[in-house]
Amino acid sequence: MAEPTKPPPAQAARGPKSPLLALTLARIRIFVREPAALFWVFGFPVLLAVGLGIAFREGPVEPVHVGLPAGDPGTAEVQRLLDGKEGLAVEVLAADALEERLAKGTIDIIVRYRGEGAEKGAAAAPEGAGAAVVDLRFDPARDEGRFARRAVDDALQRALGREDVATITEHTEIPRGRRYIDFLLPGLIAMNLLGSSLWGVGYAIVQERRGKLLRRFAVTPMRRSDFLLSFLLSRFVFLFAEVVALLGFGALAFDVTVMGSVVDVGILCVVGALSFMGIAAVIGARTDSVEVASGFMNLATLPMWILSGTFFSYERFPEAVQPIIQALPLTALNDGLRAVVNDGRGLIDVLPQLAVLVAWGVVGFAIGLKTFRWR
């Protein structure tokens, strides 16, 4: 009777490898070997922070840009009244050029002197100083336009003889945690976790199914849960590097300080990434079309980029849609990170946001596992 063949010594020593561990290591190697993936995960968010941080950096306040129509009979008088006033930059241009620049936002207000009389909406001098009438043209939908209207009106009234009865003092120092870059950086971290989770998990699953790789996995004893968990574990290897890179850059370049616990920031990021991966698992569960998957991922990400307060506060939107916005996972992660990073709060304070993230993650993975197919 022939003796059973023994495995080579090296193979026997190595033993059987866990499918989950093997897949996780393979995905890490694939990611590291992709320069484009490294750039979009680490380089792009840093470049975005640089650009927006420079655009909204601390510096001198921009003056109000005032346009006066060339050839208008009252332009010389208005120019005399406004020239040299602090916070105003006065330009004289042709009427067509003024309208074009007002539409583009490169000037904030157009001023025309109308002489004697009274007219609704005009900046009028106080009684006894002459009834000068001035037309102010601006866009009330722009904050700059409304501010320009007040600044020009104030400058003209003072030039025409108004006396102020109160002394105003200004305090313009903005503390850490209240600057725009402090608001922006947690949003960039959350947005990056959303993008890397959706594209690194959902898109990768669809690509492997389209490349017939999942057909080979289907004939192995590998479980669907092992397959999906391998994506999660490989993403966690790079998650902390992503977060540390952005926070470190913010600290070095813009003096951003984490007011709360760094551990709490890490926990929020892990829960947030799991939430986004749950959405990715649903997107990649069945389709084998890259185009369809891309469409679903754009459908998931673009509304959240706009609504969830990444670049500006979502409180600008109508009150009726606030509950819907606050139920989005990106909104919850943005709010949670800002509460910890900028306000120094703890996990107890952000339990509502954590609950939203956990709900999205649990429901997403449950649906993904239930609907997942190898082919």
Image: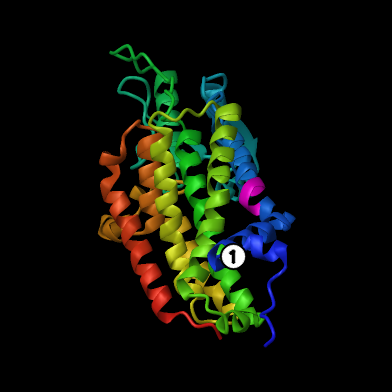
Which image quadrant: the N terminus? bottom right
Q: Is residue 115 visible?
A: no
- For label 1, the residue is 17
The residue positioned 38% from the left and 31% from the top of the image is: 260
Q: Decide which of 25, 253 is in the foreground and name it.
A: 25
- From the viewer's perspective, is residue 106 above or below residue 204? above
- From the viewer's perspective, is residue 266 above or below residue 209? above
- Magenta portion: prevailing SS class: helix
Residue 78 percent across, percent down from the top left: 52, 28
Residue 305 percent across, percent down from the top left: 47, 56
The residue most toward the bottom is: 1
Residue 127 within the magenta-colored segment of the rendering: no
The residue positioned 33% from the left and 48% from the top of the image is: 315
Crowd band around label 1 with a 10 angstrom C-alpha radius: few (<14), some (14–19), many (20+): few
Q: Decide which of 13, 136 is in the foreground and name it.
A: 13
Q: Decide which of 101, 286 is in the foreground and name it.
A: 286
Which image quadrant: the C terminus? bottom right
Q: Decide which of 131, 298 is in the foreground and name it.
A: 298
Residue 358 percent across, percent down from the top left: 33, 57
- From the viewer's perspective, is residue 238 above or below residue 261? below
The residue positioned 31% from the left and 36% from the top of the image is: 346
Q: Which amino acid, by three-letter code, is at mark 1?
A: Lys
Mark 1 secondary-structure assignment: loop
Q: Is residue 289 left or right of residue 321?
A: right
Residue 181 percent across, percent down from the top left: 51, 35
Give, as a single range, the part of the protein colored magenta: 40-44
